[in-house]
Image (cartoon, helix red, strand yellow):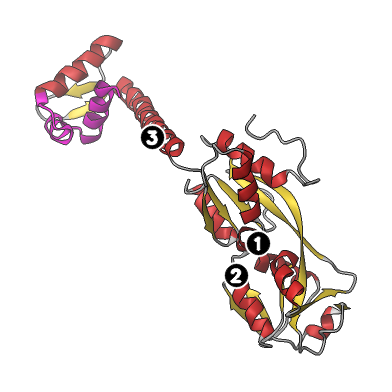
Amino acid sequence: MDYHLLTFVTVAEKLNFTRAAESLHITQSAVTLSIKALEKKYNVTFLDRTNKYVRLTKAGELFYFHAKKILSEYKEVNNLIGHLSETKSRPLSIGSSFTFGEYLLPKVIADYIKKDKKHDNPMISIRNSNRIIDQLLHGEIDLGIIDSHLKHHPHLSITPFKEDELVIIVSKNHRFASLSSIELKYLYDETWILREEGSGTREVVNQFFQNQNFDPPSVRSFGSTQIIKESVEADLGISIVSKYAVQKEMFMDTLSILRIKNVPIIRYFSFIVPEFSFKQHAVSPLITELTKENKLYQNLSYGE
C-alpha cells in the first residue's frame, strides 16, 4: 500500500496533522514529510495550512477523491488474494437442497471420488434453497444445488440440469390409496403436510396451488421430508414430494402415490455458482459428474 496516499487521506479527513499522526501511530514530522513528498511529486499544493486550520485546495479535493478510490482498490485486492489463498487450501464445499442432497447427491459424490482418487472428499451442507443461495453469496460454499424456480440472479450463474416430478403421497390406509390419479378438487379437505416456507419444494407447491386456484384450509409445515413421509404413513395427512424422495417407500410398499389428472408437477434441479470464483476449475469435474446423464445440460464448458 502507498503510505503517502494513506497519510494524505487521513490528514484530509482529520484536517489536523496531529490527529492524523495519532491515528496512524507515526510522528507528526513523518506526516509532514509524506505530504511534502506528494506535493513535490505532482508539483502542486494539496493543503492550505496555517497555525489555525488545514484546508484542501481544489487540487487537494481532486486528489483526495481519487486517493480514496485507490486505497479502496488496494483493500479489495488484498481481500481477494487472501480469499484465493484460503479457498485453494480448503476442500471443495457444496451446498444442496434437501431433496437432491439426501436422495441423489451421495451417488454423484461417490462416482466423482471413484473417477479420480486425487479428488478430496468435498464438504457438504444440506439446507433449503434460500439458505444455499445465501451461503453462495457469502462465499461459504463453492457450488450450490437447488430445486426452486429461481432462473436469474445478478451475482450467480444458474443452470437447470435434471428434471424432477412431484407426486402426491398418501398412507396405505387412505381412501384414495388404490388410485393412480385424481382431480385436485377432491383433495381440498385433506390435511396437507408440506415443507417449510423457503424450501424449493414449498415454492413449487405454492406456485402449483396458485395456478390451480387451490387454497386448502388445513396446511402444516415441517422442515424435513423424512418427517413428512413418516407423518403421512401415520395417516396424519397427505403431501407433495419429489418422486426421488419416496423410492424406498414405494419399494417397501409403505406409501401410495397419486398424480393429479392431466396436470404433471414438474420442476428442475439447478446448479448455481458465483459469476466469478477462484474454485471454478475445481468445481468443473463435479459439475460434469452431476450432468453426465442429462439431456438438459450438454457440451459442458464451465471452467474451461
* The N terminus, quarter of image: top left
Residue hosting label 2 = 197
Residue hosting label 1 = 103
> Which quadrant holds residue 105?
bottom right
Q: Is residue 187 above or below residue 28?
A: below
* Residue 202 horizontal/vertical position (percent): 66, 69
Q: Secondary structure at mark 2?
A: loop
Q: Is residue 183 above or below residue 153?
A: below
Q: Nearer the viewer, residue 112 or 13?
A: 112
The answer for how far apart the CA atoms under marks 2 and 1 are is: 21 Å
Mark 3 burial class by Cα count in 10 Å: few <14, some 14-19, many 20+: few
Q: Amino acid at mark 3?
A: Gly
Q: Are marks 2 and 1 in contact (CB under 8 Å)?
A: no
Mark 2 burial class by Cα count in 10 Å: few <14, some 14-19, many 20+: some
Q: Amino acid at mark 2?
A: Glu
Mark 2 or mark 3, earlier in chain: 3
- Which residue is rendered at x = 20% and y = 19% of the image? 34
Magenta stretch mostly in which secondary structure? helix
The magenta segment = 1-28
